[in-house]
Image (cartoon, helix red, strand yellow):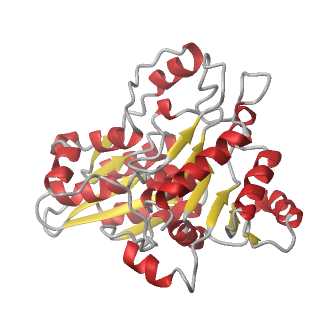
């Protein structure tokens, strides 16, 4: 591969939306740590491309539908000096193998899979609070210490989104009378162990409407029915069911403009952190101890975990299993959520 021209880097992270959002500090670190002109490309699944399309520092976003064979020949033709593999699975391995023939060097994240298994199965915490963003940035260790480099440039390593909403206090103040901020309730969750029961959402929604807030229900097609039922329960109130009706880019914008986001361990949570929206984060069968909590969220953000038993949590790495008779999300009482919502709003409401 020719050494003329820019240093070309391919960053690989296929899914999920939250994981892709969490890669943005790596993009900035690459530009800060490598000398000369740097051209960063990103490979992901097409469903998650909105998290990085148009993101400052990315030259091109490559997408796949099912297999990496869809793009491998084109990637080889472009030629890369480095592959930063933040997925570390068989698919990303295929990409690395294809590019090695052209002299590409690959750097692969340590997913700490064994440590996560030990935490879930035996309660042995060897992660010690380490966040996945730190693992991602540590992948760049051959170039230096990424967090120190970002800090030295006045960057705290926070997350970014392409459709970042402006949240300057002055701008919000001047538009508040015409466009009062709304509250977003993120109903969606990839797994049942992360999903709050409908009855809980009903209580939270009713409280917010009584307080005079306008509310948006956000989520995907899977949440459309529950969103419609919740909205119908408060006919005549200012509540909009947007589940399954908007793409990720529009959802990002809506989250960025929200006065508050109530959300579980989902991609919307990481979007809220990136957009510095105050949040009440609801943890079910997963736990921030796994390293997937919000990264540098708004300082007023509150996290709630299930009430007892504290033993044997997290139940699973993905939230697809619960080991308790009463599911973890059901053990976050609506009263606790409402109290947290009121606390955050009292701190952030103009």
Closest to the observer: 249 or 5? 249
- The residue positioned 59% from the left and 68% from the top of the image is 251
Residue 17 in sight here: no
Residue at the spot 36% in from the left edge and 54% down from the top edge: 11
In the rendered view, does 312 fall on the left or right side of 141? right
Image coords of residue 168 (percent x, y):
38, 73
In this view, the residue in front, 239 or 134, is 239
Residue 298 is situated, as x and y percent measured from the top left of the image, at 42, 54
Seen as rendered, the residue at the extreme bottom is: 178
Residue under the point 65% across and 32% down: 285
Q: Is residue 77 above or below residue 342?
A: below
Give the answer, above or below, for where 299 lies relative to 60.
above
For the N terminus, which image quadrant? Answer: bottom left
How many numbered callouts?
A: 0
- Asked whether the viewer can see residue 238, the reply is yes
In this rendering, is residue 328 above or below 185?
above
Query: In the rendering, at what x and y percent does residue 162 appear?
Result: 43, 70
110 relative position to 196: left or right: left
Residue 73 location, quadrant: bottom left
Which residue: 40% across, 45% down?
86
Q: Is residue 230 left or right of residue 50?
A: right
Above or below for 227 versus 132: below
- 225 and 210: which is toward the camera: 210
Indicate the position of residue 239 as horizontal and vertical percent values: 75, 69
State which quadrant residue 38 falls in.
bottom left
């Amino acid at each position: 591969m020719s050494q003329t021209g820019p240093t070309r880097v391919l960053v690989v992270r296929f899914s999920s939306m939250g994981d892709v959002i969490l890669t943005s500090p790596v993009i900035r670190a690459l530009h800060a740590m490598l000398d000369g002109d740097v051209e960063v490309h990103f490979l992901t699944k097409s469903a998650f491309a909105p998290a990085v399309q148009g993101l400052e520092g990315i030259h091109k976003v490559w997408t796949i539908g099912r297999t990496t064979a869809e793009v491998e020949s084109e990637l080889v033709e472009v030629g890369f000096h480095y592959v930063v593999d933040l997925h570390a699975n068989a698919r990303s391995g295929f990409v690395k193998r294809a590019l090695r023939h052209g002299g590409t060097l690959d750097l692969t994240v340590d997913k700490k899979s064994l440590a996560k298994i030990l935490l879930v199965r035996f309660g042995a915490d060897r992660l010690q609070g380490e966040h996945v963003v730190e693992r991602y940035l540590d992948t760049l260790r051959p170039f230096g210490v990424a967090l120190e480099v970002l800090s030295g440039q006045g960057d705290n390593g926070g997350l970014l989104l392409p459709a970042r909403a402006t949240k300057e206090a002055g701008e919000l103040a001047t538009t508040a009378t015409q466009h009062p901020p709304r509250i977003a309730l993120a109903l969606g969750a990839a797994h049942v162990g992360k999903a709050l029961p409908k009855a809980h959402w009903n209580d939270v929604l009713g409280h917010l409407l009584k307080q005079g807030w306008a509310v948006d229900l956000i989520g995907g097609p899977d949440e459309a029915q529950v969103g419609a039922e919740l909205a119908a329960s408060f006919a005549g109130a200012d509540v909009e069911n947007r589940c399954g009706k908007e793409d990720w880019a529009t959802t990002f914008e809506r989250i960025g403009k929200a006065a508050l986001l109530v959300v579980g361990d989902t991609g919307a949570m990481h979007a809220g952190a990136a957009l510095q929206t105050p949040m009440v984060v609801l943890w079910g069968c997963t736990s921030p101890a796994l390293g997937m909590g919000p990264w540098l969220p708004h300082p007023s953000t509150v996290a709630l975990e299930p009430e007892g038993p504290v033993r044997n949590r997290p139940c699973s790495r993905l939230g697809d299993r619960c080991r308790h008779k009463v599911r973890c999300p059901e053990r976050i009482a609506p009263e606790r959520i409402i109290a947290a919502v009121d606390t955050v709003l009292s701190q952030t409401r103009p």
